[in-house]
Amino acid sequence: MRAQFPVCCRRSAVVFAVFLAVAAALSAAGWAAPPPPQSPQQAAPPAAAQKSFVIVGAGVADGSGSPLVHENVRVIGDRIARVGSFSPDPGEEVVHADGLVLAPGFIDTHNHSGPGLETDRLAESQISQGLTTLLLGQDGSSPWPIGEWLEKFRQDPAALNVMMLVGHATVRRLVMGDDFRRPARPEEVAQMTALVEQGMREGAVGLSSGLEYEVGSYSTTEEVVAMARVAGSYGGFYISHIRDEADRSFQAMHELLQIGRQGGLPVQNTHIKLGTVGVWYRAAEVAAMYDAARHAGQDVTADCYPYDAWHSNFKVLVPDKKYDDPASVSKAIEDVGGPQNLLITDFKPHPEYEGHTLEEAAKTRGITPTQLLIEIIRDGDGGVIGHTMTEQDMRVFYAQPWVMVSSDGGIGMKHPRGAGTYPRVLGRLVRQWHWLTLPEAIRRMTSLPAWRLKLRDRGLVKEGMVADLTLFNPQTVIDRSTFQEPQKLSEGIERVYVSGVLVWDHDHATGAKPGKVLPK
Ligand SMILES: [Zn+2]
């Protein structure tokens, strides 16, 4: 990488010059003018006619990380109107919340509910976790055109708020088609940057990549830098499933930092993990590396899901892509600690493998795990849950103040994180394991992601903020989803409000769909 540095710089400088020229031309044509700001408040009825209610008796975790305070919270319309020691007005609706905790609605910076929301606008598995805002378009993959997709959710909203990223691989496929197994040529990179610009102008809040996956893995760092720079110029950030989450994790993390520095934008190492034996127990080194970058002035954050197992396809296990080479495939299995750590979740040609480990399925067939893995990838690949991270590393990650909670889950997911992430953090990491205090865990789910996403009126229980709120029982809140029953809903999230409207009530969705497309 270092040897190529001057070349990369020159190339991206040329590309950027092309971009500037294109942008200037568009601007001259009047296309680059920002769309007129929308103000949803204007459409709302006047304050006097707005519904108001007061939540009384809850301990308020305001999202800042400060200790709980016992204060009443009044909501008028879609806003928090008052926080303090006051009595409800005569006749005003009162929500009694003794023994409960009131927090800002949870914000997930890595969510895969995009496809699920198409047919399930209520998103029960998400709102039942206390989630009120989802960032979609992850791992390099987004719908296209983004503006059209977002418009559908303005016309026919979901129960909760949605935000979108431009997917690096999506843009790469649009430009390169099926001929993507090579670095992009400069003129192709210029086309990609123009598409990133289009996505940002249509409402995306940043660029996502999945550099470990098939399409993204062939891109050079400078290609990603060129695209990231455009996202950054629109105020966006770069969130990446980095190029390697296994033996070469550290190189991949360095690349992330390089993309942030050269692209001039904030970066986030999403679902941060150390996924192979060779890098286990090195989370403190990762933290030290990112801390050093932060101290040097770089804006770098991470998000982490609270499980020691990932969910992906089998191909990601073989980083050298020698999918039919027994030596490479055997090493891949060894690197994750053995075939007993790999649970098959989907394999179309042999659905009977699903729910069994690679070890079990191979034994049933009377072949070696290596032979079976080669066969699975050859026959179209499948879904796999890899129990390949350590709890110790996860704990170190969660000890970092710049690591937020994310799910990497979503509607219909076959990993328990899809329905259980946020209650799991509150019930297990906070209440049972004491990894985090409750106010700090809430901060990692609310104001920290809100800050990252520049949602200036969300993420805090404070006068004037939007009333996205979650009310839960700190004694009982817990995830119920498991690897066997990943869809099981969580318990203990009592009420969830989006823009002041109740969307989740104890054990059911209310049917209300007040969700907005954010940030505008
Ligand atoms: Zn990912």
Image (tube, rainbow, N blue to C red):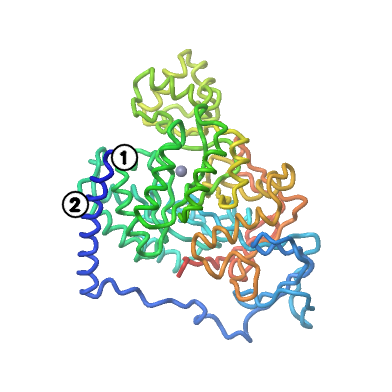
Residue wearing tag 2: 187
Judged from the image, the secondary structure of the residue bearing numbered disc 1 is: loop
In three-dimensional space, the C-alpha distance between marks 1 and 2, rounded to whole angstroms, equals 24 Å
Q: How crowded is mark 2: few (under 14 residues within 10 Å), some or many (20 or more)?
A: few
In-image side of 364 versus 496 (left or right): left
Q: Which residue is drawn at 38% across and 18% down?
A: 326
Q: Is residue 226 above or below residue 94?
A: above
Q: Quadrant of residue 64?
A: bottom right
Q: Which of 2 and 263 is in front in this view?
A: 2
For ligand 1, tell me if the residue under mark 1 lies within 8 Å: no
User: Under tag 2, what secondary structure?
Assistant: helix
Residue 2 has which mark? 1
Q: Residue furthest front?
A: 296
Q: Which residue is drawn at 38% across and 28% down?
A: 377
Q: Is residue 487 above or below residue 361?
A: below
Label 2 near ligand 1 (CB < 8 Å): no
Apparent side of residue 123 relative to residue 297 in the rendered image (left or right): right
Q: Which residue does the image show at 51% across and 31% down from the upper left?
A: 279
Left or right of 195 in this view: 363: right
Q: What residue type is labelled 1?
A: Arg
Q: Residues within 10 Å of mark 1 (few under 14, many from 20)?
A: few
x then y, percent, for residue 68: 74, 62
Indicate the quadrant where residue 230 lies: bottom left
* Identity of the residue drawn at 32% across and 58% down: 196
Left or right: where does residue 488 sit relative to residue 178? right
Q: Is residue 113 visible?
A: no
- Residue 89: which quarter of the image? bottom right
Residue 28 percent across, percent down from the top left: 21, 74
Residue 65: x percent and y percent? 66, 59
Quadrant including the N terminus = top left
Q: What residue type is labelled 2?
A: Glu
Mark with earlier residue (1, 2): 1
